Each structure stands twice: as structure tokens, then as C-alpha cells.
Image: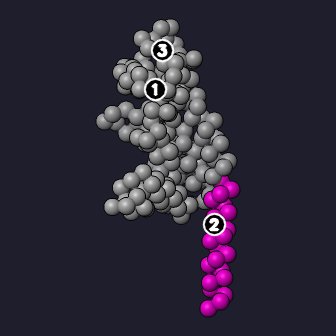
Amino acid sequence: MSENGNGRGARGFLTRLVRQSRLYWLKVLRIKAEPEVVARGIACGVFAAWLPVVPGVPFQILVAIVSSFILRGSKVAAFLATWISNPLNWVFFYFVTYKVGGFFSPFEHLSIRIESFDMEAIKQLANVGWRGLVVMIIGGTIIGIPSGVVAYFISLPLIRGYRKRRALRQMRKTTSL
């Protein structure tokens, strides 16, 4: 096949990725809840996305849903927003959370020192153990809280604007009939 949107090449992959991202965003926009509720759900999901993925445990999703329950946000929006962290960018997220968490870590000496973002860093991150996991949770929490707040304030006007435009389109459609 060719390297167009339907092909298997890099361009086709990126096209599918963009389409899938847009589909998830439209699903979030169409959630039947108040914009503030949806934005709180997005904030909870973005916060949880900075936490590490624990194999066999849907840790990010559990944190997103529990925090959206506590903050009265949309659970669906929280679930979908966790996908900003995905297998394509986990290494970046882990690297950043490990570096930030290491700065605030209660552990004096960890067995690894990550200085650059390369294959060696990936190997080291894969073998950090429970101490490294705690460091990444600390770093993820420190980065996730402000990220969630920013996500709330960015998504709220976007949701309101989308719904306003949609209502205007519906009104035009009904008045032109």
C-alpha cells in the first residue's frame, strides 16, 4: 500500500493517530454534562496521566476516576484524558517524572542516575523497582497537579465555545426548515 492516510507508512500512522485523537476529543465535547463537570474530569485525567503505568493495574484510570468522583467531575472525561499519556510517550513522561521526583525524593541514593533521554535511560527506567516507582509517583503528582489545573482552564472555554457553536448550528438548522 502507499504511504497515504490508509497506508501503513509513517504518514498513515500519523493520520490515524490524529483522527483517533480528534475522535476522543469529540467524545469528550459531546458528554452530556455541564462544561465545568467535563472540564473537572479532564483535569483529573490529565493529573492521573502523569502517574506511572503499573503493569496489570489500571493505576492511572483508577486515580482519574476516584479523583473525578471526589471533585465531582465527569468520569468518562477523566478516563479519556488519561490517554494523553500513552505508549508512544510513556518514556518521556517517565523520564520527566523520574527527574522531578528524584529532586523531591525521600530516598538518598537510588541505584540509577539518568542524565539524558536515550536508550540507556529507557533500560534504566524499566528496571527502577519500587523505589523508582515511588519517585515517579512523587514526580507525577508534582507535575500532574498544575497540569490538571491548566487543563481545566484550557478545556472549559473550549467546551463552552464548542457547545455554543453547536447550539447556533442547531438553531439555524431548525429556523431554516
> Magenta span has 41?
no
Q: Amino acid at mark 2?
A: Arg
Bounds of the magenta segment: 156-177
**105 relative to 25, above or below:** above
* Residue carrying label 1: 118
User: In x, y percent, where is residue 18?
Assistant: 49, 56
How many residues crowd around disc 1 within 10 Å: few (fewer than 14), some, or many (20 or more)?
few
Q: Identify the mark nearer the N-term, 2 or 3.
A: 3
Q: Quadrant of residue 87?
A: top left
Predominant SS of the magenta segment: helix
How many residues crowd around disc 3 within 10 Å: few (fewer than 14), some, or many (20 or more)?
few
Q: Identify the mark nearer the N-term, 1 or 2.
A: 1
Q: Residue at x 63, y 35 (%)?
A: 146
Of 17 and 65, the residue lying toward us? 17
Q: Amino acid at mark 1?
A: Asp
* Residue carrying label 2: 163
Q: CA distance from mark 1 to mark 2?
A: 43 Å
For label 2, the SS is helix
**3 relative to 49, above or below:** below
Position of the N terminus by quadrant: bottom left
Decide if residue 70 is in sight here: no
Q: Which of label 2 and label 3 is nearer to you? A: 3
Q: Amino acid at mark 3?
A: Arg
Identify the disc placed on residue 63: none
User: In x, y percent, where is residue 59?
Assistant: 40, 36
- Colouring scheme, one of rainbow, by chain, secondary structure, one colour: one colour
